[in-house]
Structure formats: structure tokens, C-alpha cells
Amino acid sequence: MNSEQFENLARLYVVGALEPQELVDFEKLRRDLGDDAEECIQECERLNAAFALTLRPTPPDISTREKLLARIRSVAR
Amino acid sequence: MMQTVTTETTSESQESGDVDLMLRIQRGDEEALGLLYDRYAGVLKSLIMRVIHNEAEADDLLQEIFVELWNQSATFSPEKGKPLGWIVTLARRRAIDRLRKRQAYARVEEKFQHAPETQPESWVHNTMEADIEMNDARRVLQRVMADLPEAQRQAIDLAFFKGMSQREVAAHTGIPLGTIKTRLELGLKKIADALRGLKDEL
């Protein structure tokens, strides 16, 4: 498998589109390729950020932030 | 502070700002969590709603995601990727988990098919919104996504926002698996190529 083929798989991986057996094969390839694979996957993970940034923000309920911070304060880490 | 989501630029300085916030969160800084929430809660809620189509549940899940982010912050490393990608990946996974847990695929698909107008605006429609001030990176990405052939965009939408595998996309659309694979590969490659031109901005 060449680098372009791995990149294709990595992009499908980060958007969660690989079939179960493809995922198994991809994880094996990932281990075999080591750092090069991780670098490629990191690059592909920018796709996720890109998809999110193209959405128009929907303001959360105003109480959500307060509830979140109250929960954080109430639970010891 | 929600307006910061649409008015701040996703620049290199903001990216480093995200890293700083994550490092502060790792040290237990609640204020940093609040600032990160202010910055991204809006887009994350839109993302969640694209998956589960329920506003109250989206707010609930948003809170859960930021709690998890807080609890898992020690696993974040700037060397392993940028904060936004990490956070979006977490949010998407949890939204899809929620969707599957309540075993409402059929109901959600029905909503997806019949009520697109009520969803948060998608990438295509956003390009026409004059009232939203968008940064350069966002505009470039929206243009790229809007220019994708409809078939490729649909395949990506089902995979990313509905959590479908290639085989599930094929079954859902009635299109051969090989065609779906090709559409996904071509569409994702176009977007990835565009991202290379935004190296420092996303």
C-alpha cells in the first residue's frame, strides 16, 4: 500500500466510515507504519474540525454553562 | 460570549490560545474551561443537533462532553493534534453513541429526510448567510464543501453526521457500495486538499 492509499483509508477512518474488517486492517497498518501513520491521521483529523466550523453556531441554553461549571466545582478531579 | 464563535478568527494565535486553554484545564483551571466553552459550544451544539435532532438533549450532551473534556484533559497533548480536532472528534463520537443508545435510527432518519429546514444550517446554506461574520478559513471551507457534487456531499454527510459506515450509507441510499466508497474518497480528498492550504488556520 502506498502513502496515498493509506491517506484515503485514514480519511475514512477519522470520519468513522470504515467497515469493521477494514478497521481491523487499518489498525494493523497503523501499527506497522508507526509515526508516519500517526502524522497522517492527525492531519486527517483536521477534517472533523473543518466540518464543525462550517456549521452555523447554535447558542446553547443559557443555563448549560452554569450547570457545567457547577458540576465541575462539585466533583473533585 | 457566544458571539465569539462567529466573530473570532481561527488564526494561528487562536489555535495557540486553544492549546493554552487546554493546558490550563489540565491544571484544573475552571475559568479556562468556561472560555473554551464560550469559544466552541455553539458549533459543537450544531454538530450534536445534526446527529440527534433534539435541542434539549443536545444541551444535555454538550454539558456531558465538556465534563468529559475536563476529566480527560490529561490525555490531551499538543503534539498529538490540535484541540479543536480533538474536541470535535469527542463530541461527534458521543453524539453518535447517544443516537445509537436510544435506538432511534428510524425516527431520526425520518426527521433527517423531512425537516432539513429546522436543522442548524448546513455548510451549503451558510454560504448565503450575510448576517454571519465568517473568518477566511470558514469561508474557504464552506466554498469547498458547497462546490462538492451533491452525491459526494450526501455520502459525507451520512458518514460524518449520521455515523454510518460505507455499507450503511450504501444501504440507506440504495447505491452500490463501490460507488459510495468512491464518492467518499473523492469528496474527502477534495476537502483535505483544501485544508492543506489552511495549514496554520485550522
Image (cartoon, helix red, strand yellow):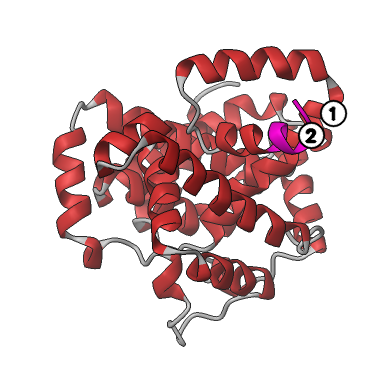
User: Is A5 left or right of B191, judged from the image as shown?
Assistant: right
Residue A30: give x, y in percent of width and height. Answer: 73, 19
**Circle 1: is it few (<14), some (14-19), or many (20+) Cα within 10 Å?**
few
Question: What element does badge 1 sit on?
Answer: helix
What residue span does the magenta drawing correspond to? Answer: A1-7
For the C terminus of chain B, the image quarter is bottom right
Residue occupying the point 31% across, 42% down: B175
Residue A71, position in %: x, y? 45, 33
Left or right, B73 with respect to B57, comes to right
Q: Nearer the viewer, mark 1 or mark 2?
A: 2
Using the image, tell me which numbered label, if any, was put on residue A64.
Answer: none
Identified at 81% across, 34% down, the residue is A39
- Any part of residue B37 in sight: no
| Residue assigned mark 2 | A3
Specify the quadrant of the image occupied by residue B116.
Answer: bottom left
Specify the amino acid type for callout 1. Answer: Asp
Towards the viewer: A50 or A3: A3
B177 magenta-colored: no
Q: Is residue B106 left or right of residue B119?
A: left
Determine which of the numbered discs, if any, sits on residue A36 in the image.
1
Q: Mark 2: few, some, or many residues within 10 Å (few <14, many ≥20)?
A: few
Asked if the residues shown at circle 1 and circle 2 are in contact, with their CB atoms under 8 angstroms apart, the answer is yes
Give the main secondary structure of the magenta stretch: helix
Q: Is residue A56 left or right of residue B192?
A: left
Residue B123 visible in the picture: yes
Q: Which secondary structure, mark 2?
A: helix
Marked residue nearer the N-terminal end (1 or 2): 2
Task: Indicate the amino acid at tag 2.
Answer: Ser
Q: Residue at x 54, y 66 (%)?
A: B1
Kindly report the distance in space between the C-alpha atoms of the residues bearing marks 1 and 2: 9 Å
